[in-house]
Image (cartoon, helix red, strand yellow):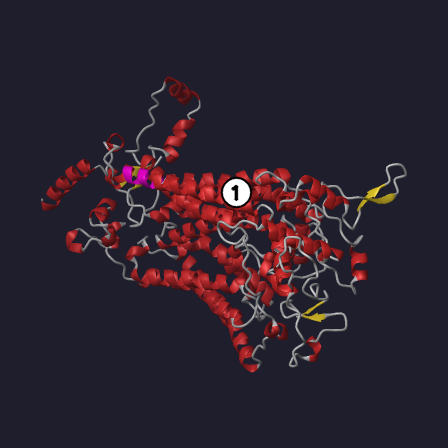
Amino acid sequence: MVRVLGILAGILMVFVSLWSFGHGVYAFISSPPQKSVEKRFHEEPRPLALASDGLFGKYDREQLQRGFQVYKEVCSSCHSLKLVAFRNLQDLGYSEAEVKAIATNWQVEVPDVDPKTGDPKGRKALPSDHFPSPFQNEVAARAANNNALPPDLSLITKAREGGPAYVYSLITGYRPVPANLPAENRPGPTLHYNPWFANLNIAMPPPLKSDGQVSYADGTKPTIDQMAKDIAAFLAWTAEPRLENRHADGEVTLLFLLIATILAYMAYQNVWHGGASRAVRRTGVLDPENMAKRDAASAGGLDG
Amino acid sequence: MSFPWAEEYRPKHPLMRWLDERLPLPRLVHGAVGGGYPVPRNLNYFWNFGVLAGLALTIQIVTGIVLAMHYTPSGDMAFNSVEHIMRDVNQGWLLRYAHANGASFFFIVTYVHIFRGMYYGSYKAPRELVWMLGLVILLLMMATAFMGYVLPWGQMSFWGAKVITGLFSAIPLVGESVQKWLLGGYAPDEATLNRFFSLHYLLPFVIAGVVILHIWALHIPGSSNPTGVEVKTAEDTVPFHPYYTAKDGFGAGIFLILLAFVTFFLPNYLGHADNYIPANPLSTPAEIVPEWYFWPFYAILRSFTSDFLLPAKLWGVLAMFGAILLLFFLPWLDPSPVRSGSYRPTFRWFFWILVGDVLVLGYCGGSPPEEPFVMISQLATMYYFAHFLIVLPILSWVEKTEPLPRSISESVLHGEHAEAAPAHLGGISPAAAE
């Protein structure tokens, strides 16, 4: 009975899925799907190799410091970094005093209240503060940016397909508008053509305009490409500050598990086939002596 | 439980004897997973996956309880509290990555466990209830995983919650009210987050309870085995401990190596980038996709694109839930007296087609809802239902099966690769085997 009902239900489901399939095939043939303009012009992220890649990857601290400098001098005028605190900069190799100086001299004050009157009031940042946002709130941010909202950058390399390579490609990805781009996809007056951005037109103006826009203290030549790589590396760190702990712990854990698993395999083989654990298997059916006895008995039985 | 030759629990130490007379907990363990549980001696590595699923559940509960100590289920703070775990809590990144990837590995081992049951006919009498309780666990796992994915309150959390609860709105008449009731509002919000957190904490313990029933029901007839021939004598079995505890220890090692590798070195590989963007009700992601373990069902949901008597959306919802619910009837849809696929040459073909079919569905479910993926998933959906509802019932009538070994020990003696003994060496026909 279940089977008959099952077959009937099955025929119904097959019919309904074929019904949808038929409609799909008809639509596919009568009006073949067009690849959207965005898809046709969109580019995959350009490859970017960072010191933090791979199983043994570690951050290049000099590069992170350079990237932080680019953030401080270029990005931070529009983009917040809410999840990162000044104290975290010690991971980049800055000393406690340097971090304190960076916090005190930060261009934006931290919102606070006057301890006497309770009125809103700004104060100098402390190492324990998170990076203050350049705008008071979303409305202020949009008002200052032609109604576009500059995203927070703390997690940007994890929140975009391609990660740091995407950031690197995007900020070096401003191109002249291609001649064959349809009119409705051309950037408006406040937008900029960038084929690495999902809808091709990005509100952010090119942030890195010329070589030497920042001057690196460590003597690295500040080309646009170098600055883009450095900021991508810095933002990889802001998104995953525990990467080095993760890699180091992972190496130790895998080594331990590998040894433990080899021992477990040897124990398994020993229990099933070994000689050393005879005590365990003396009564077991897989004991070679017991098996030999049984084989002899069953061979005799079959013959008879 | 199970067989009369099961080794009895005889405590040697006076303290254990004292305990045994008052609270025979060690006796229970001895009979459940110790030397007192005789298990077929011919189990292959696919029989490791039940224990591995139990291990995965344990990892999820342990990591989850600690995560809950640092997590805040509130619309304003959920996302940042997860980042607080990632950045400021000692080893918090490890807990969260282990929990997120542990969920994926829980599904991997559970799916292998289910397909093993399908291939070897483990769902057949007298183990129907073992199979059905297993499906209850799967449904609970799916609900738990779905609600857990909402908690970080990223873009995919929010929109996933909206889409999945939106499925209930396809129910005629009461659908809209049901959706509102589930969410505690018109859209996912504070109320949704709080109830999902509460249920996400509760359900794993319900799962643990059903796991106990699943194992209890299993221990009545005892474990199935690759030949599908029931245990006949003591020679067919070995005690669970030390034989299978040793083998499971090795299996657990391999499982942990793979889980650790992904957790430590590819922690975001199985996730979606959009979930690192805080939930924003005003901005719809370009594509809303669930976690990979839901992709086959998501593909079934989306493959109904044309109305036929009922709205297409309702067909999709019915088919998606039906795809799991029909498995409850599997023991009766496939009444072939031969359990194991090893002796069912035609079934074997269809089984592997089904495996490929589910993989194709998974691939299409993770792809954007464009052609050709929709058409492919429509055909794959058709086969999925045809396999269980048409192919298996008919197959059990028409298939000519291969001779079964007389017993488990005999199949072992003839070597693992020639389990079916030829007729002149004692192989017997399936009818006689039952």
Q: Residue A82: horizontal and vertical position, in percent?
A: 71, 49
Query: Is residue B170 at least partly visible in the picture?
Result: no
Residue at the front extreme, as displayed: A219
Query: Does the magenta-highlighted stretch encompass residue B77?
Result: no
Q: Residue A194: horizontal and vertical position, in percent?
A: 66, 70
Q: What secondary structure is marked by label 1?
A: helix
| Chain of the residue on which disc 1 is drawn | B
Q: Residue A127: horizontal and vertical position, in percent?
A: 72, 41
> Which region shows up in magenta?
A264-270
Nearest to the observer: residue B32 or residue A188? A188
Dominant SS of magenta comes to: helix
> Which residue type carries mark 1?
Gln
Q: Residue B426: horizontal and vertical position, in percent?
A: 17, 51
Q: State which quadrant residue A126 falls in.
A: top right
Give the residue drawn at x 39%, y 54%: B118
Q: Which residue is mark 1?
A: B60
Nearest to the observer: residue B124 or residue A167? A167
Q: Is residue B18 above or below residue B290?
A: above
Query: Is residue A78 at least partly visible in the picture?
Result: yes
Residue at the left extreme, as displayed: A304
Q: Is residue A146 above or below residue B126?
A: below
Nearest to the observer: residue B309 or residue B144? B144
Quadrant of image for the N terminus of chain B? top left
